[in-house]
Image (cartoon, coloured by chain):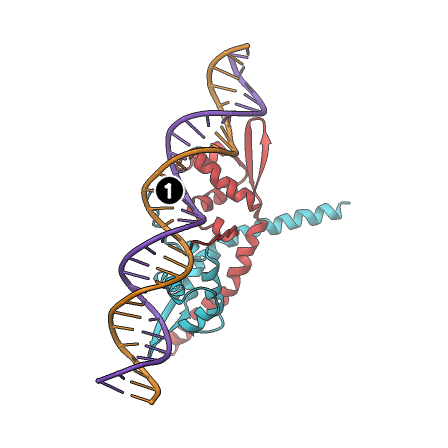
Chain colours: A red, B cyan, C orange, D purple
Amino acid sequence: MPQAEQDRSVFRAIADPTRRAILDRLRRGPAPVNELASAFSQSRPAISKHLRILRELNVVSEQRRGRQRVYRLEPAELKDVADWILPYRDFWQQSLGNLKSYLEDE
Amino acid sequence: MPQAEQDRSVFRAIADPTRRAILDRLRRGPAPVNELASAFSQSRPAISKHLRILRELNVVSEQRRGRQRVYRLEPAELKDVADWILPYRDFWQQSLGNLKSYLEDE
DNA sequence: ATAATACGTAACCAAATGGATACGCATCAT
DNA sequence: ATGATGCGTATCCATTTGGTTACGTATTAT
């Protein structure tokens, strides 16, 4: 689409597998950029760009410690995703229920 | 990135707001393409392309009824998203808990 | 003071994304 | 049989995305 999409939602942020992996890592505790970058076969600037996106959406926060920048998970914004996905849960549980009763009717 | 990303995950599928809106609509029941398309200020082919993406990821299914194609929500694949997001829930609940005890210590 | 370290940013680029229009093909109404 | 309806696909295009290398800046080590 040639239009200005400007979709800066957290859904876009977690669409990228590298960014999800970064978040998964930060769930185990804060980490400086070098440690995050060393886990991927990408250049460090690439990771910096991913971190910027996560930062601007307040999914992570940055704390400067000396020449390091320690990133920390700020999961509050991820709540939007959970709020969106959870209503669908009823559906697949219902589908499982249907399958169960179908099998029991055999 | 010039590489072949080939990231055909459901996370990409729900990154687009139009596709999320389509899924939200289908949660209220199956619908033919025209009804889905009329809800957006996009051309019908654009909606067809969104539906194709959702179809190929098995997030929706298609049933032909005469000249209509009725789309139905198949939420099983969305479980991956729920499984990914739910562990983060503990974090923001914990953050809320910390805030609560902080306030209570005042 | 100088070099090394830890990062961010700028500029650039190929591929992917998401839109539009034009067209084709069944299916239904007349 | 003929036209209208419902939908997918092909082609094209601007924008976005996500990578790279080169460079700049602040902090620490020597």
State which quarter of the image contains the N terminus of chain B: top left
Residue at position x 46%, y 44% from top?
A: A19
Label 1 residue SS:
loop
> Is A16 left, or right, of A69 in this rendering?
left
User: Which amino acid does the dot numbered 1 rest on?
Assistant: Met
For residue A27, say whether it is visible: no
Q: Which residue lies furthest to the right in this view?
A: B106
Q: In which quarter of the image is residue C23?
A: bottom left
Q: In this view, does C10 lie above or below A80?
A: above
Residue at position x 43%, y 65% from top?
A: B75
Residue A101 percent location from the top left of the image: 42, 75
Q: In this view, does B95 lie above or below C27?
A: above
Residue B37 percent location from the top left of the image: 44, 69
Residue B74 percent location from the top left of the image: 41, 67
State which quarter of the image contains the C terminus of chain B: top right
Q: Name the residue under label 1.
A: B1
Q: Which of C23 and A39 is in front in this view?
A: C23
Q: Which of B34 and B42 is in front in this view?
A: B42
